[in-house]
Amino acid sequence: MKYAGNSGILYRSIGSTFLLVLALAFLSCTSKPAPQPKAPPSKPSDIKIEVKDGGPVVITTTAAEFQILPSGFLQATLRLSDKRLTLDEPVVGSTGGSDSIVSQGKELDFVPDFGQTKVLEASGKLGRGKRVEIPAHPLAPTGIAIERMLVVESYDDFPGIALISASYKNVGKSDFHIDQVLMQQHRFNAQQVDAKAQPYDMWSFQGSSYDWGKDDVQKLVRTSSQPNLMGEAVKGGYGGGIPVVAAWTASVGEAIGHVETLPWTLSMPLKVDPDGRVNASINIPINSDLKPGESYSTPRSFVAVYSGDFYEPLRMWSSILQKEGWEIPKPSNEAYNVSWCGWGYEFNVTPKQMLGTVPKLKEMGIKWATLDDRWFDTYGDWNPRHDTFPGDSIKQMTDDFHKQGILAQLWWLPLGAEDGQGKWESHKYIVSKVAKEHPDWFILDKNGKHGRMTRDLAALCPAVPEVQSYFKQLTEKFIRDWGFDGSKLDNIYSVPACYNPAHHHKSPQDSVNAMADVYKIIFETTRAIKPESVTQACPCGTPPSLAWLPFIDQAVTADPVGAVQVRRRIKMYKALLGPHSAVYGDHVELSEMSRVGANGWSEHGADFASTVGTGGVPGTKFVWPDPGPKFKPVALTTEKEAHWKKWIALYNQKMLSKGDFRDLYVYGYDSPEAYAIEKDGKMYYAFFADPGKSFMGELELRGLKSGTYNVVDYVDGKNLGSVQVENGKTPRLKADFKDHLLLEVSLK
């Protein structure tokens, strides 16, 4: 790691060999001009553009104002009735803009030539809009022959977002070296909207798949700093991520990211500086030369300004990607049904243990049973273990579940294969059959060795057609031949860049980009065989990846560390996949956890409310009958059984996961923490006290139309009286509760 110029923001250094090839791929547009807009629509955009001599350029939409200042800094302001709210605070007297490059270790600022600004009508997949082109030259001594064209787009249907791209052209006669490209450099200060606040007094969402169990929603503190590497695999096998970083206060929020449908390898660091200001940016490692006449074109980045928390920028980001061709499938009906998982028995589960729970599954109204980790002999080959699943017992087990009216799901981990190196838990790796027979299928790193992914497995290259065909065959075996009704794809992050010369990649990034192809094959093959199947992908302990997110029926809160993460991640997925998406709250036992030793956890939670009340799909991993002391924390006792039955029956009765998730409360600022779901003409609210504390006060029941409403605590069946809504005024309800309060509100 090292610092980029004087920005004080970390970036990742990547080897020159990779980046030379990467540059050739991304610079495939090197001699091409920036994409030109299509023919203007019949009706011009309502967005107003004002170009002032010497700057700024002011872009005004129905919701926001975006200014490109004389320094090149892009300032985003929320227009809220008669208020103008922003977190952006440019450094006074700074010549550094929001977009620049680093060359030979020094950041090179650019001076916009506002006199040459072009304003055009824009049209295309995002609808009507305006496109502004601003040329610039470097703020440096003569002799640096590089020019920049900054393109800012704004669209009527997305008034809170400005899209920015830049192209850098070598207009000299010799090669020009680019270390990295910097985009969307912003300095946030909460004092812009609250003079009494600390500059960093805000909450953040950071979408990188960075480290297991780390909060993706965090309240910033003076020492906050996170690199937010995106795209290819990172240390520990994580990687991928949602390329969005957002910060918000009670009144305004701002977010940056990119809107490409491929997982670009870059970083989006967020860091609190010594003066308390919050720096955020997008940093793209290049480390390559532009030849004379060549250009480098950046991805389309964005800055969004909004009122609310992380839900709104994620919703906007997803909506734009969907316009650009990112198709979000409608979940199957079965994706909303409660699931039991055999992971309570851990690695050595047997068919007898799996099927032994059937009486309880039927009593409780649980529709799914998941065969979890280590039913198989070898990663990559995916054949049943002889000691726990001999002969055709795995298919027999699936058939037996079906006879009892229960659907079966299979755990597996695509793209990883054993190559004789390493181990995971007690499982020491051998050389898998696929590694012996197809050594040319593997990702190679820059040193010619197998690229490693999660669990320290060797990674098969998803860009190889034969690898894609192999995963189609595996899916057919699991779903058609063995009879499973879906897959639990686990430990799903990203893969390394591939330097295998036998693959003839245009860029090492091809392997990262092609992950989407493999997951699309798994999803579509499964649905073709069983239309009501469920494909679930779990990026354990982290946010998901844009590469595979469109190819699932059911998202999962992914090994949440406690109930707070369950609720946050359900809200995250409702923003990304839509208000009716099926989001599995994971095993309810994960809602309360305590440390055991250095790396272990005891999982003993029973908080169904955090899943049911927020519109998630509940699940459990209880063991029954009692198999002994090792499994005591998850054993289904008589007391727990009554609790499980009550909550699962409530879920099956209300089925709030199919309701319309409403973004009515601001996380971190509305107290108590609150969620709202509209379903069948009723409004359902879920309020949560701070962990271990009680709440006493008034609750705001937002989103109700005029009328008189009856309020019921639907968990305990208590009538709490009525509230009146007049003249659009939000009604208040006095409440005193511990942990949670779930309400059903209906017109009298």
Image: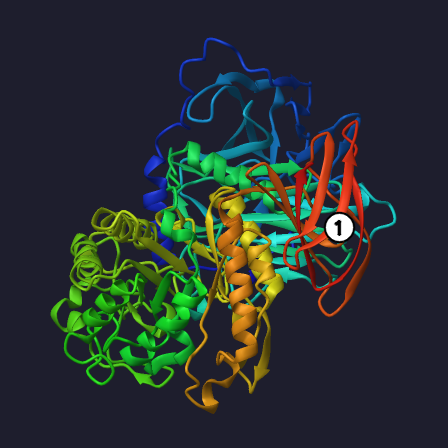
Comparing 252 with 503, the one in front is 252
Comparing 367 with 370, the one in front is 367
Q: Which residue is drawn at 57% across and 19% down?
A: 116
Comparing 146 with 740, the one in front is 740
Comparing 365 with 635, the one in front is 365
Percent across and percent down for residue 224 are 68, 61
Percent across and percent down for residue 507 are 30, 50
* Amino acid type, label 1: Leu
Q: Image height check: is 662 above or below 171?
A: below
Alpha-carbon neighbours of circle 1 within 10 Å: few (<14), some, or many (≥20)?
A: some
Q: Image height check: is 630 above or below 350?
A: below
Q: Image height check: is 551 above or below 216?
A: above
Return the residue found at the far bottom. Answer: 629
Q: Which residue is drawn at 76% across and 67% down?
A: 693
Quadrant (top left, top right, bottom left, bottom right) of the C terminus: top right
Q: Residue at x 67, y 34 (%)?
A: 76
Q: Which colour scheme is used?
A: rainbow
Question: Mark 1: which secondary structure?
Answer: strand
Return the residue found at the far left. Answer: 437
Residue of label 1: 720
